[in-house]
Each structure stands twice: as structure tokens, then as C-alpha cells.
Image (spheres, rainbow, N blue to C red):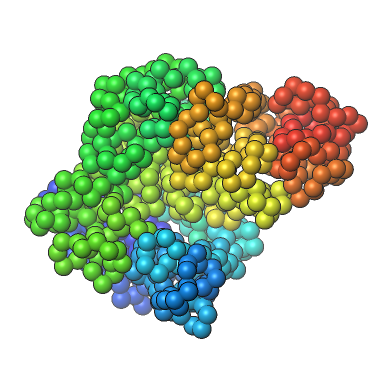
Amino acid sequence: MHHPGPPRFATVGESVELAPRQPDPGMAAEWRLVERPAASTAALGDGPVCHLEPDVPGVYRAEVTAPDGTHGQVVRAFPSITETARFSVTAEDFDYDDDTGGLDDRAIVIGTFNDFTMGIHWAERDGDEWVIETDLPPGTHHAIFSFDGSFESTATDEVTVEGPGRPRVELTGATEGEDVVVSADVRAAPSGSEPEVEFYLDGRDALEESAVTIDGDELRVPHEGLPEMARVHAVAVAERHSVADTLVVERGGENGETGTGETVSVSRPADPPAWAGDATIYEIFVRSFAGETVDTTFEAIERRVPYIESLGVDVVWLTPVQASPTRHGYHITDFFDTAEDLGTREEFESLVDRLHDAGIRVVFDLVINHSSRDHPAFQLHRAGVHEYADYYERIPVSQDVSDVDWAGTDAPGYYFNWTRIPNLNYDSLDVRRWMLDVVEEWRDVVDGFRCDVAWGVPHGFWKEVRERVKADDPDFLLLDETVPRDAAFAENEFDLHYDTDLFDTLRDIGTGAEPASALFEALDATAEHGYPDRAGHMRYVDNHDEDRYLDQYGAASLRAAVGATFTLPGTPMIYAGQERGVEQQRGTMRWHDGDNDLTDFHRQLVALRADHAALRAPGVCPVAHTVETGDADRVVAYERTDGDETLVVVLHFGDGTAKVSLDTIDEETDLLSGNPVGGDGTVEVGDIVVVPATRER
């Protein structure tokens, strides 16, 4: 079915891509705008994939005529809440030799406001400053300044736009007599006003609007008017709008009986798999895993699975294993085959089977925002082969700031200074079909995708990917790389999200720029962004794109930071080598000379979290405490509970040992190490202590 999918929600000025699903290359598909608000002059372009940019708030209705009929698409646009923000840097902010006075009068500026794309925004020199102003929504925003786009000399600035966060909404369903009732639980954003709810039906279903009654936060439909399946969408609306929630209502099932004797089931397609919240992820940077003198292959990794088993982890995320000329693997030259140096497809599947035998799921690094510029498709594209003309993004040469002499009268689109990995063009049905084939190729082999540069691929495409992979396997995991984090990708797209707020905060704590208690603000940011309560978040201190925490902030702070990722809500991730004392970002695994004490520390944390449901439950409560000896800013304490058990966690990010007194502990034996840690309500903590809370509160 070529129907474009669920209703879409956006702000005025935000471009929404519209595309038929299940694309066939060369298929005819034509869009037209059939309804728009009275004051709107918005229009749709030509082609099977087009973009709607709402210019006033309201409901827009588009239709696409495809080979299987005409399908409608609703786009609800909300007011854009923005404020003009000013970014500025000085010459002193650059790591730049200015002895000749040769700094340019203009600097390139990139950030989330232009998808980290060079050549769109420029800062002009104003005296000793380079300044740019742009309209931004509430939140904290960063800008990177560069003179030549090479990133050899950059400066950054941060601004905070005041204003409310995004509200949230959660749908539940039940039967009441002859009616099916969908209820919306709306929650105001921090510092936001009480929201109202808007319900929307899904154009793919046979549920008629005339059969539905809406009263405030409830939608009702008589059982006799309910088709075999109906999808109900809702969005909370205050100063800003929420991430939409979805409920699927189906005849049959065990969730609720109707007066007719039939049953109705309800399900939540946007929720992450239940297992993901209990899991621990282990990221392997593939080509550095086997050791100093041994080439890493699938077979070499398979021979080391007993070590991975010994850590107690539940998921292995492998960096790209497809054909690529690079060590890191993100420059793909063949999306459908494995890299020759790593091994054959059969050997890769043998590794997956071995991990499955150990009870470990496998997450595949899905790279579909770009390809290597050495991919044959890109070579044919730049060489003027007509069939490949629209496979990659094209930008005017005037926007290109690279030193590449691109063939032709334009340049490829790319992010940052990534000239070797040009962006695919998702306005092309050929590309959408190609990348859906890539998804189909690997989804039955592995248990999930970590989606590289997820923020670069259109939302509508991710929604289609989700429905495809979840149709036969609801437990399939989708992990997004959105840096910085963006709650929009939680709307029927991804299960698990990078928590860049906690990551950055743990590093600020490591430098001493923030007190240890700042981690509570990082957790609060999740609600501020508007993530649904049920959304999953990956908590981590290292990954293959960042300098190692150990190298930057030291062993004592590392242990406390890792302790935080395992004792706060979310899914912890260990980056291979983190537990062995590797200090290089993508350094070789230290097998014979690694830090065994640090490795055992990670094993203990994995086991502790697995053994205590309180550490996997939602919610964190700060605990009052007094630091008797040590730096109070380097200590934080909090409670974790699942209702049956309550634990107190104390973290110390400093050197040596801190003595901390608390009124909330039941005994002074550390559950992590099994060692006594003090007495009379006082604990001595080197890095992390976990103790039971007082039973009578």
C-alpha cells in the first residue's frame, strides 16, 4: 500500500516531507494540496516526493495519486515559538595563529539550526567579534564557527533561549459498555501551561470521523462502528505541541470485552520492547577488538565471545561490518555485503548465532544517510549517468566550502566537513526503495539497528522503517544517533535514544565545571525536551566518536560516572575498552595489559543492576546528605525504588575517599562490593556505594 502513513505534526516554517510508501522506482505519484488554512499560501512542488512548509497554523490536507489509488495525508501545523538568539566568538576563542592578522571577516557557522551544513550561515566580523543572529526555539543551542570548513580551527558558543518545554501525552484504551474509550493523559511541560489534547484518525483505516465522539481528553467509538483495526493519534497542545502518541485498537484480543461478546485489544506501537529497559549494551569498535597483532575478523570476535559473556551484557552493538575502505566502516561501498577484511556473510552470521547461543542480542550499525563517495552509485551520479542523477543531494557550488573540485556545475550535499560521505537524496523514490532493501537485507539477521546520523534521514522514512521491522518482530530494537537529542524521533520512530544531556553533564562533572548534583538537571532535561515517559534512553560515558572519559578526567571520576549510568534510569552502554582501561578513542583492546580491577568493577555493576529491579525502575529521588570529609561538590546521593525495594546510591567523583552521612540508610554494607562502608549512618565512598534504604521512612 502506497499510503503515506500517519498524520504529521510540525511547526510553522518546518518542512514536512511527503512521500508514498512502498515505493517502486519509476512509479507515477502526484501530490496536490486539497485543503489549507484560509490565510495560507503554501503550495506543493512536483514529483512523487515533495515538501510542505506550513506558513500559518492549522490543518493542511494533501492527497497523493499512486498506482493503488488516491491517499490522504493530514499535516497539523502549530505556531512556531522562537526568539532571536545571538552567537558570537572572538579571535581568542579560536585555536589559531593570528600573527599575520589574517583572520577572515566572515566565518562559517553550523549547528542544529542548519543540520550542521556548511555554507548556509555565515558570521560577520564586528570589531573583535564574529557575530550571527538566528531565530531559535526554547532550549540550549550550540554553534560551531570555522573559517575554512576544515575544522582545524574552530570556536563554539552556547546560548539559551528561555521558554517552556514541550508538553506530553499518553493514550490508554478500554471498553465501557458498548463503547471503546481512548483516554489521553496530558502533562504540562516544565514552566508550561496546562495543555489541551487534539485527536486524529489514521487515513489508512476504515474508522470514519462521523463514528467518533470527542469530549475533552476522551475519544469514544461505538463497538459497532469499529473496523478490524483503527489507529488513534493524539497530540497535547499548549505554548508548544507534544510528540504525538498512538494507540492501535483492534477487534479480538484479551484487553477488554464489549457488550457484544467480542473483545477489543489495544497496543502501543511507539513503545520500546520491554526487554530494552533491562538490558546492558556493549559497543564493539570492530577493527580494534581482536588485539595488537591479530587482524579483527568475525571469526576472531567469535572466539572472544566468552569474554563478552563474562561481562553479563545483553546486547552487542557492532560498528559497521559492511564493505568500506575505512577502518571505522562508516564510508559504505556496498550496503549488501560484509567487508572482505572482516569475513564473509556466512562468517558474520556465525558470529551472530554464537552470540545468540550466549543469550546476547546483536545490534547492527545501519548507515543509510550517506554512502562513501567511492560507492559506484555516487561515481555514476557525478559522472553524469542519467539513471543516477537524483541519487544524491545537490547543492550550488557557491554553498560548497570544501577544497574539492567537484565534477559538474554543482556539489554534493554533506554534513560538517564530511566530503567523503555525500548525503543520499531521499526525495528520490529510487533511493527510498534502495535503502528499504538494505533494511530488508539485514533485519532478519540481527536483533536491532543503531541508526547512524539518524537526524539526517527524513522522519517519514523512519516511520516507514519502524512499521516494516516491527510488523514481524515487535522486539526488534531501533536506536537513534541524534546528537544533540531530539524528542521528535520518539514519535513512532525509535525505541532508544542517545542521552547527550547526561553524557555532557558527566563530562562537565569530570572537569569540575559542574557539581555532581548537576546530573539531576540532566535527567530533568528529558521531560523538558518532551520525551514520552515510556521512551528509552541510552546512558553512556564513552563511544567511538568521543575522547575517552578515562583519558580526559581520570580513573576516579570514570568509576563514578560509569556508576551513574548503571544506577540511573535508562539503558547503560559500555564502549569496549572502557572496562579495560583503553585511553584512545578507537584504541586497540587491551587484552594482556588491561585493568582487571576496572573490568571486574563493570562486571559487578552489570550484575548489581540485573539483580535489583529498583535500579531499572523509573524515577530518581535526591537524598539529603552531609559530606564530612572531601569536596561536597564531588558527591551526590539519590534513591532508587521499584516499590518493593529502595536503594541509596552515593557517587564520589573526586580522588581518595569521601565520608558522607545520611539518615536514609539501613545498613552499611555496599551491595556492589560486599564490603562494609562505615557505620552509624555514615559511609565511606571512593567512587560508588549502593546500600539498602531505611525500611521505616
Pick the front one: 628 or 261: 628
Q: Is residue 249 above or below residue 125?
A: above
Left/right of residue 10 with respect to residue 426 in the rendered view:
right
Residue 566: percent from the left, percent from the top? 62, 34
Q: How many marks?
A: 0
Q: Residue at x 35, y 70 (%)?
A: 120
Q: Position of residue 491 (x, y in %)?
A: 44, 49
Q: Is residue 31 left or right of residue 670?
A: left
Which percent across, then down, holds residue 124? 43, 79
Q: Residue furthest front?
A: 99
| Quarter the N terminus occupies | top left
Residue drawn at 84 percent across, 38 percent down: 659
Please tell me whether residue 659 is drawn above or below residue 489 in the rendered image.
Answer: above
Depth order, front residue of 160/586: 586
Residue 491 drawn above or below residue 58: above
Farthest residue in the bottom direction?
A: 127
Q: Identify which residue is drawn at 27% across, 60% down.
A: 413
Between residue 221 and residue 427, name the one nearer to us: 427
Name the residue furthest right: 680
In the image: residue 342, left or right of residue 406: right
Say which quarter of the image contains residue 107: bottom left
Where, quadrant-wise, is the C terminus in this rendering? top right
Q: Position of residue 226 (x, y in %)?
A: 38, 41
Could you tell me if residue 274 is visible in this image?
no
Please give the name of the residue rendered at 46% of the width and 37% of the height, measured from the top-left corner.
587
Q: Is residue 193 visible?
A: yes
Left or right for 220, reference 336: right
- Residue 199 occupies quadrant: bottom left
